[in-house]
Image (tube, rainbow, N blue to C red):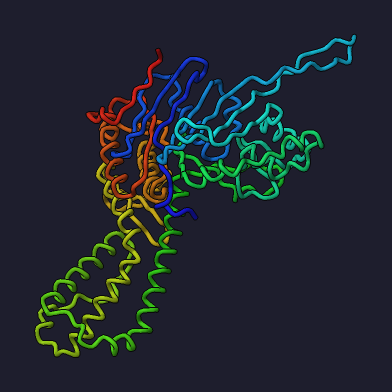
Amino acid sequence: MKDSSELLRVKSIRVKGLFDLFDHTVDLKLDERVTVLHGPNGVGKTMLLRLTNALLDGRLSLFQRVPFRRFLLVLSDDRAVSVTLAPAKVKLEKSTRKGRRRQNHPPPVLHLELLQGENPVDRMEISGAQDVVAMAEAISMRMPWVQRYDEDLWYDERVFRELLTPEEVVARYGDELPTSARRSAQRSDPDWLKAVRDQVNVHFIAAQRLLRVNMEDSRRPGSRPRTLSTVLDYASDLRAKISETMAGYGQKSQTLDQSFPQRLLASRGEALPPDALKERMETLDQHRNELKALGLLVRLDSHPFDTAAIDTLDPGQQNVMTLYVKDTEQKLSELDDLARRARLLLDNVNRKFHRKQVRIDHELGLVAESENGRALGLDALSSGEQHELVLHYDLLFRVRPNTLVLIDEPELSLHVAWQKRFLPDLLEIVETAQFDVLMATHSPFIVGDRTDLMIGLDAD
């Protein structure tokens, strides 16, 4: 896994001739870490996000299907990746009827270049013959168990565990292509492009985010992957995260408990003074109660301690209590990161929900309840409530520091009051989690009075 501290940030995104109409320059607000694209329909806000994701996620076939002249991604170390599009040469093929010749129009050619400042460092070319979508379709014809799911995704009926991009289909099943096509499919991205992708994390939150593909439910040959409510998927994801975190908490507790006698004998003379010991004991009780209120601790491991009794401890007892306090602080620290994210999730969501709330449950991950405590299905929440929960969960639990998060239309299904709260909530999350956001919106309420974060994409 990449070390988040070593990841590069995206500094600027520029595109010329998008849809043969628009030139856009987006200099990201690196200090605030949130940049808002605003503009009318049709100017390419969503496509700019998709092209950015495609370049950093290895889905270059998108660039062959979208009209543009140049796309430039500038990184925080002043290197840049340039993608330009050029028409492929038209080939004449002999017709079998009356000797006529017909024109064959191959996909356009992509030129990718690594720049340091304005100076070229390295380059690669993807010829028109390497139309990976057409190749994936050809593979699907030869291997009927490789099925198309939607415009850019395929799946293997025999596996049922993942959706594949056309690039992944060609890489995995390219041997099924004819020899001539297989040669053109044997493209390996150069080391410099792989290195860029390894240094930049990207996470795309698309406009359609309430449904996810559940590959595990499709077991019979000929069946398609089914969709799953994202809130249910995220509830399961949180349950797994809680289980993993509690396992770490248990392991830390066991290690400290087993070594307690040896460390106690070696810690003579390191006792905290009574006032400091009292303060830290009270802080521990408060910490435990907060974790229990969050739902991370099902029960308290100990009863509140009478801190007044610390004044009567002899030096040996004081030494024991000091080591106990330090050990307990270490144990609870295993839960701190999960607790911080969970608290922010619940606070941001529950202050908006009306006459219902979401809470954390060890067995179910996330549960929703009415104000009288009656259980509600997460997938029975309104679309606006689900959007709010999904967006916050995605940002808090599925994004690593220094990732570039691309959010398309965060305002979907949100009441105007919730739209107005979205950006302040996002800025709070970003300050905590330390990632960058580039989002595209039509809503003036999302921007609010933070026009300093906005970049307008004009239709002129």
Residue 28 falls left or right of residue 112: left
Residue at 28 percent across and 39 percent down: it is: 32
Residue 326 falls left or right of residue 172: left
Instruction: Give the residue furthest to the front.
Output: 119
Residue 50 falls left or right of residue 180: left
Residue 253 percent across, percent down from the top left: 36, 76
Specify the quadrant of the image occupied by residue 409: top left
In the image shown, does 328 or 295 lie closer to the viewer? 328
Up/down of 425 relative to 306, above or below: above
In the image shown, does 370 or 265 lie closer to the viewer? 265
Specify the quadrant of the image occupied by residue 386: top left
* Res. 37 in view: yes
Number of residue marks: 0
In the image shown, does 131 or 370 lie closer to the viewer? 131
Residue at 31 percent across and 59 percent down: it is: 339
Residue 68 falls left or right of residue 411: right
Residue at 39 percent across and 36 percent down: it is: 11
* Res. 405 in view: no
Specify the quadrant of the image occupied by residue 133: top right
Residue 436 percent across, percent down from the top left: 37, 41
The C terminus: image quadrant = top left
Up/down of 161 relative to 460, above or below: below
Residue at 78 percent across and 38 percent down: it is: 177
Up/down of 370 relative to 450, above or below: below
Residue 26 percent across, percent down from the top left: 39, 28
Residue 108 percent across, percent down from the top left: 64, 23
Up/down of 29 relative to 281, above or below: above
